[in-house]
Image (tube, rainbow, N blue to C red):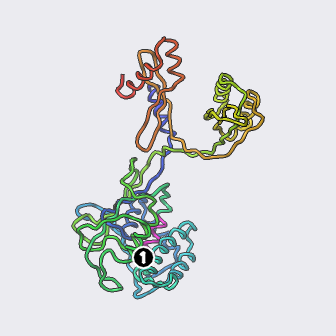
Amino acid sequence: MAVGVLITNLLASIKQFMRILYFNASSGISGNMTLAALLEIIGDDNYLLDELKKLHLDGYEIIIEQVNKNHIHAKHVEVKVEESHVHRHLSDIDKIIDGSDLKVSIKALAKKMFLAVAKAESKVHGIPLEEVHFHEVGALDSIIDIVGTAILIDKIHPDKIYGGELNEGKGFITCKHGLMAVPVPATLEILKEGQIPFKQIDIETELITPTGAAIFATLVEKIQDIPHGKIIKRGFGAGTKDIKIPNILIALLMEEEDEMNEEDVYVLNTNIDDSNGEILGYVQEKLLALGALDVSFIPLYMKKNRPAYKLEVILKPNDLAKISDLIFLETSSIGVRYRKEKRLILKREEMSVDSIYGPLKGKKVYTSNGTKIYPEYESLKEIAKKKDIPLKDLYDLFIILTNYGN
C-alpha cells in the first residue's frame, strides 16, 4: 500500500466526529411520530417497551407496526389507553416520573418537556402553573410519548440535536376545548417561547401537536438545513392521518467532523524597555523552539516616555515555568503577568504537494465551510535558499499546485 494511502487512512482514523440527531419535520411533528422515528434509529422495539415498564403504569397498550404513507415504508406507533376524562396537574405527572425506576437523566428530560406544555397552557388560559389541568397532554398516551422520547434520546445520546423549519397545517380541529383554529393556542405559545420558525402549508388539519411542539422545542438546539456529514442511521416515523403529502417525521443520525477543539492556555506578558530588536528576535525564536504557541511584540511607551515593547506569549499551562525562566534569562524583565484563557482551534493536518523543486509542505485546516490550505514558511524558505528562488515565487507555485494540481 502506498505511503500516502497509509497516512490518509491514519488521519481518517484519528479524526473526531460529532453525532448529530437531525429532525426533518416538513410534515409536522407529534409525540407518536417522534417515538416511531427514534425507534427506527434504535432498531430495538423491545428496548422501549422494557424501559416504559419502569413507569409502573397500567391501562395502556403500545402497537408498533410498519405502514405505508404515500408509498413510503415507515414505522407507526399507537398508544391505546383504557382511561377516559382523566385530568392531571403537572405535579401529578412529576410524581409519576419521579416514582419510576428510570435514569435520572431521562426523568429530567421528560419533566422538562412537560413543563414546556404546562407553561403554555398556563399562559393560554391565564391561570397559575400549579392550577393547569392537562387534558390531551395529561392522558396516558401523551405520557408514554414524552417519556418514551426521553428514553430513546438517552439511548441514542447524540452530541447535538438540530432541526429544520417546521410546517403546520391550517383550518380547524376539534379538541377538549371545542373547535380550535390551527395552530392551536398551546402549540403557538410553545413555538413562540422557543422562537421556533414555522410556516403554514396547504394541508387542512393539524400537523404540529402541543406534545410534538414541546418535544421539538426542548430537544432542538438550532434550526438549520441538514448539516454536512455522513448519515449513519435514519428513522421514518409515520403520523396517523393520511394526507396529500407523506405524513412522516424523518430523523437522521449523522456524523459530522468536529472542526474545532477547545483547550486551556496561558497568556503571559511583560514590558521590556532596554532591549534592542535583534535580541528580541532571538528571544522569539528560542521561545517558539521551547514550545510557545505564539509570540508577539507590541510597541509602547513606558514611564518618562521611554519607547518599549510588550512581549506577549501564548503557551500551554504546563510550560509556564520554563517559558518564564527563558524570559528572565534572555531579557531584562524581572516580572511577568499571566492569565488563564480558553482558545478554539481548528483541526489541521500536515500535507505537501509535489513540484519540480521537490515537495512543498503546508497544512490543511478544516472549517465548517470546507478546507483551507496554507504553505509552511520554513519549508518554502529552505527550498528558496537551496534553489536560489524568490520565496514569493514558491508561495505562488504552492497556491497554483494546491488549487489546480501539478
Q: Quadrant of the N terminus?
A: top left
| Total numbered badges shown on the rendered structure | 1
User: Where does label 1 land, which residue?
Assistant: 142
Compared to 27, does 130 lie above or below?
A: below
Q: Position of residue 294 (x, y in %)?
A: 61, 34
The answer to whether one can see residue 201 in this image is yes
Q: What's the residue at 23%, 68% (across, down)?
A: 202
Q: Position of residue 204 (x, y in %)?
A: 24, 73
* Residue 60 on the magenta span: no
Outermost left residue: 244
Viewer-nearest residue: 149 or 211? 211
Q: What's the residue at 29%, 79% (across, down)?
A: 173
Question: Which amino acid type is marked by label 1?
Answer: Ser
Q: Quadrant of the C terminus?
A: top left
Left or right, 349 with reference to 61: right
Viewer-nearest residue: 158 or 168? 168
Q: Which residues are magenta?
A: 142-152
Compared to 109, does 332 lie above or below?
A: above
Q: Which secondary structure type mostly characterizes the magenta part of the structure?
A: helix
Q: Position of residue 76 (x, y in %)?
A: 34, 68
Compared to 276, does 128 lie above or below?
A: below
Q: Position of residue 314 (x, y in %)?
A: 63, 38
* Residue 143 on the magenta span: yes
Outermost front residue: 304
Left or right, 68 with reference to 228: left
Q: Quadrant of residue 37?
A: bottom left
Q: What's the residue at 53%, 79% (across, down)?
A: 96
Outermost right residue: 334
The answer to whether one can see residue 66 in this image is no
The residue carrying pointer 1 sits among few (fewer than 14), some (14 to 19) or many (20 or more) residues within 10 Å by Cα, namely many
Mark 1: secondary structure: helix
